[in-house]
Amino acid sequence: MLKPEIYRRQRNGAWRAKTESCLCILVTGGAGFIGSHLCDRLVRRGHHVICIDNLCTGSLDNVRALKRHPRFRFLKHDVRKPLDIAEPVHEIYNLACPASPRHYQRDPVGTLQTCVMGALNVLDLARRKSARVLQASTSEVYGDPELHPQAEDYVGHVNPVGPRACYDEGKRAAETLFFDYRRIHGVPIKVSRIFNTYGPRMLENDGRVVSNFVVQALRNEPLTIYGNGEQTRSFCYIDDLIFGLELLMATGDQVAGPCNLGNPHEVTIGQIADLIVELTGSTSPITYQPLPQDDPKRRRPAIERAVRVLGWCPRVSLENGLKATIRYFTLKLFGQESPSIAPISYHPMPWERKRTKPATSNGLVTLVPSRD
C-alpha cells in the first residue's frame, strides 16, 4: 500500500518519486460545490476517485462529465452511516455537510450528526485503510470573532445555543475528533479551515452572498443585503481553494493543521453588491433586511501559515472570479441545464514541475505556486 511519506521532500529538496502511478482517493460530499471541483481536479491528475454523496445539497449534474470516466465512481451514501469500501483507499477528503445557513438550519440535528458521526465514520475508514484524511472545516469555528483577522490559534467566539450552532459547534467537534484520532490511533490527519468560497456550481438558492447577488442581479431583482452592508467578508475563488486543499493533503505527517484557506482581501457586503451590479449590467436596486442572529460582522483569514507551510496564496482576483461565476449562472438560468466553465488556471503540483525551489531545513513545503 502506498505510504503517506511519499509526499515529503528529500534532503536535496526534490519531491520523492511516487511508488504508484495513481492513488485511490475518496471524496465525501463529492457532488457538492467544492467536492465536485475537487473530483474534477483529482481525476485530471490521473487518480482514481470514489465520490460519495447523499445528494442532500449536492447534485449529479456537478459530476455528470465524470460519470463515464473509467477512474471515477459515484456512490450514493450518507456519511452518518458507516463506510464500507472494498478497495484500498490512500486518501480521504471529508467535505460532507451542508455549508450554507439556509441548508444547515433546515435540519439542525441532521447537520450536527453529519459533522460528528460523519467524522467518526470517515476516521474509522481511514484507520482501517491506513489512509491519510483531510477534514474540510470552516471559518465558522471562529464564530462572530472578537479578533481580526482570524489566525489558527484563535479559539473563537461561538454561541453554542444559537441557530448557527449546529454547524459551528459540529465542525468544532469534528476537529476535536480528528486530533484525538491522531493522538490516540496515529491516523495521519489534515484540518483545513475554509473561508468564504465562490465560483461555478454554487446553488442558486443556497442563500450565500455571491450566489444570491448574482442571481438577483441577472434577473434584475432587488439585491438583498442583510444588515447595513458594512459587515465584511473575504472571498476565495474555487480554483485557488482546491489547490490549497491538495497542497495541504500533500504535506508530511508532521503537518496536521489547522490551516486557514481563504483570500485575505476583505470587502464589505455593500461593495461586492455594487461590483456584481456593475459586472452584470443590472438595473437591480438594493434593499436592506435585518441581520440574522450571530451573523459575523467581520471575517478575514490570516493565511501566514498556508503561505509558510504550503507555499500557497490565492491568485484569482475577485473581479475575474466573479466574471466566471456570472458566466456560469447566466448559462444555468437562461441557457444550459448543466453549464461547464473551464478553470481559470490549472495549478501543477510540485512534483509535476521540472524545477522546484530549495526546501527549508524543516522539510516543509515552501514552493510558491507558479503563475503559468
Image (tube, grey):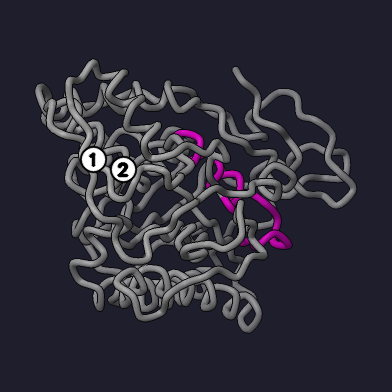
Q: State the residue at coordinates (49%, 57%).
A: 139
Residue at the far bottom in the pictured view:
184
Between the C-alphas of marks 1 and 2, the distance is 5 Å
Answer whether residue 112 is visible to the viewer in this image: yes
Name the residue carrying label 1.
212
Residues 109 and 95: in front is 109
Q: Where is residue 108 in the image (x, y as percent from the top left)?
A: 25, 73
Q: Where is residue 87 in the image (x, y as percent from the top left)?
A: 40, 61
Residues 16 and 29: in front is 29
Considering the numbered disc 1 on the image, is that residue within a helix, a strand or a loop?
helix
Residue 141 in the image: above or below residue 371: below
Considering the numbered disc 2 on the image, is that residue within a helix, a strand or a loop?
helix
Q: Which amino acid does label 1 sit on?
A: Asn
Q: Which amino acid does label 2 sit on?
A: Val
Q: State the residue at coordinates (60%, 72%).
A: 187
Q: Where is residue 247 in the image (x, y as percent from the top left)?
A: 60, 44
Q: Position of residue 59 (x, y in %)?
A: 19, 47
Q: State the residue at coordinates (27%, 41%).
A: 202
Question: Residue 65, located in which quarter of the rendered image?
Answer: top left
Residue 211 horizontal side relative to residue 260, left or right: left
Residue 371 horizontal side relative to residue 134, left or right: right
Magenta residues span 239-260
Q: State the residue at coordinates (39%, 57%).
A: 95
Residue 360 in the image: above or below residue 85: above
Question: Residue 322, located in which quarter of the rendered image?
Answer: top left
Name the residue carrying label 2.
209
